[in-house]
Image (spheres, coloured by chain):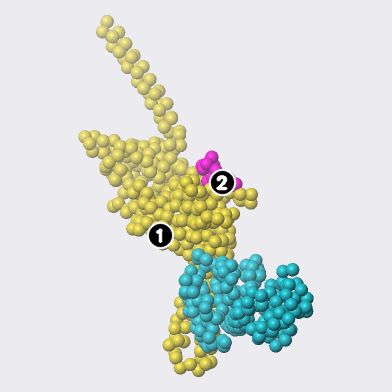
Amino acid sequence: MANTKLEIANAALRSEITERVLVEESLRLILESTRAIPWEADAKTWAFTYVGPQAVDLLGYPLERWLEPDFWPTVIHPDDRDEAIQFCIASSKTEMHYEFDYRMITRDDKVIWIHDIVHVVTTDGEPTALRGFMIDISDRKRAEEQARRLRDELAHVSRVTTMGEFAASLAHELNQPLCGIVSNAQAGERLLAAGDEDTQAIRDTLRDIVDDGKRAGEVIRRLRAMLKRTSFEPISLDIGEVIREVARLVMGDALAKGITLNLDLALDLPKVMGDRTQLQQVLVNLILNGIEAMGGETDGSREILIGTARHRGDAVTIAVRDTGLGFEEKNVDRIFDAFFTTKPEGMGMGLSINRSIIEAHGGRIWATLNPHGGATVHFTVPILKEVSP
Amino acid sequence: MSQVDSTVFVVDDDPSVCRALSRLIRSVGLNVKTFTSARKFLDSCPLEVPGCLVLDVRMPGMSGLEIQDWLDEAGIRIPIIFITGHGNIAMSVKAIKGGAIDFLEKPFDDQALVDGVHRAIALDTDARRDQAEVDEIRQRVQRLTPRELEVLSFVVTGMLNKQIGMTLGTSEKTIKVHRSRVMQKMRAGSLAELIRLADRAGVAHPKV
């Protein structure tokens, strides 16, 4: 009688074990066949205690190498290493789950992009183990890089064509100091020919010639900066100074069309993170649009106003306002779409390129109609954040 | 009126250009005054003084061409030379049609500007002299009585005293007396001279 009970219990146990093994098998199959590579590591030493077999194909190292101490830091790309390690240390203290991207170097020296998903296991409040998945996102990263390169190229092309429309301004800006130089020099020649003993007058003339020469050089320098093919390089900028430089550049053209350009810049704005050339490109484009919108008017004041203000503590708003025709209310969201234009000869690229530049800065761009006619385009640029230790 | 009494007025929003042109014009012995805006120039009421204008076309506020229009509408005839840092054909045509002496693109040769200024001042000097003469003749006309003015307007059409008398309903003799006084007051030595003076003064044709 006791034997039968034992046999039944044994049979039940065996059946349970078989079932568990089967479940374990299917779980293992799932884990070890997907592109998400499972892993587990010691929370203190960060040595892997388990890695899915897919890891072999990922980097080309056998599984035993993965389990060696210090394997993980050595295969991280040197440029990403410090940041990745710091991020892990910081996150493991405060988070239960975190994800981050970094590059790894394969056995044959290729670079791949990894997206790592981490779960922190704690015992008595202390992290004891880390578990997660690694996913190869190299294709996606390459596609993003390609998109960024194309966007920068498009911005450059647009910038060059735009600058062509400012030929009038540039000619005017260069001819002013040139006129000063030539007239001063010729006045100097006449003074000398007259046998005048007053050398002070001649010295003043020469000083003015030097200043005008430098002024002309500045104009060229600004022009070259705008035309340069650059990739997106954000640096710390004083947005007021960036706007003032653009205003000097376009003043001539605005004047030629009888349009006043006014600035209303807030004082004491914090510095922003931005690419000078690309931000200036956006401003130039918006001003050009404003000038065009006011093209047909002959009465009333024709003014473009550029203003700056603080925006919710973490950004600066720049607004370009004109007193022109405005746009139709129903189009307020469409005007930033590529190829949308209401102008017969327009290509509709300007505003959409502006949007892509502003979004690359982490800002927003939008347009509103003014109560007394015309439109205002606003955009934000994030302020420079102090890097926290 | 010599050129020495004339002043060249320069209006350009670029102070460096103003300084350079001031030196240039002074170096040829002329008086010069510079202004960095149209408003400053017009507020200084400079137009009692003979001279000419050197104007930049493009300036913030009132442009050079707008000053030309303003002066034209105000009936002020001062010769203008335009200078510009960037001009086009339409702009220069408008300026010349508006009566400008010249239209120079910066940077320009100093001789071109100096020649233009000399020409302009000569024109202005002549114009002022002409105007002074006309004003003086008009003063002579002012001294005529209404009847004498009437007789003058008929005399210059070549009508005989007798015909004038019939038209105006008086005797030939009376007409002769009026005529003599007219010749005296107008200081005309002959009929031909009288006709010329009446013409310059703008005496209207008789109402018949």
Counting residues from the N terminus, which is met first, the one under dot 1 or under dot 2? 1
Using the image, tell me which numbered label, if any, was put on residue A240.
Answer: 1
Magenta-highlighted residues: A327-342
**Residue A296 drawn above or below residue A117:** below
The nearer-to-camera label among 1 and 2 is 1
Label 2 amino acid?
Answer: Ala
Outermost residue to the top = A1
Q: Is residue B16 above or below residue B27?
A: above
Task: Inspect the magenta stretch and tell me whether residue A334 lies in it.
Answer: yes
Q: In the figure, is residue A35 to the left or right of B87?
A: left
Q: Amino acid at mark 1?
A: Gly
Could you tell me which secondary element the residue under label 2 belongs to? loop
Closer to the camera, B29 or A359? B29
Q: Residue furthest left?
A: A124
Q: CA distance from mark 1 to mark 2?
A: 29 Å
Q: Which chain is cyan?
A: B
Q: Are marks 1 and 2 on the same chain?
A: yes
Which residue lies under the disc numbered 2? A338
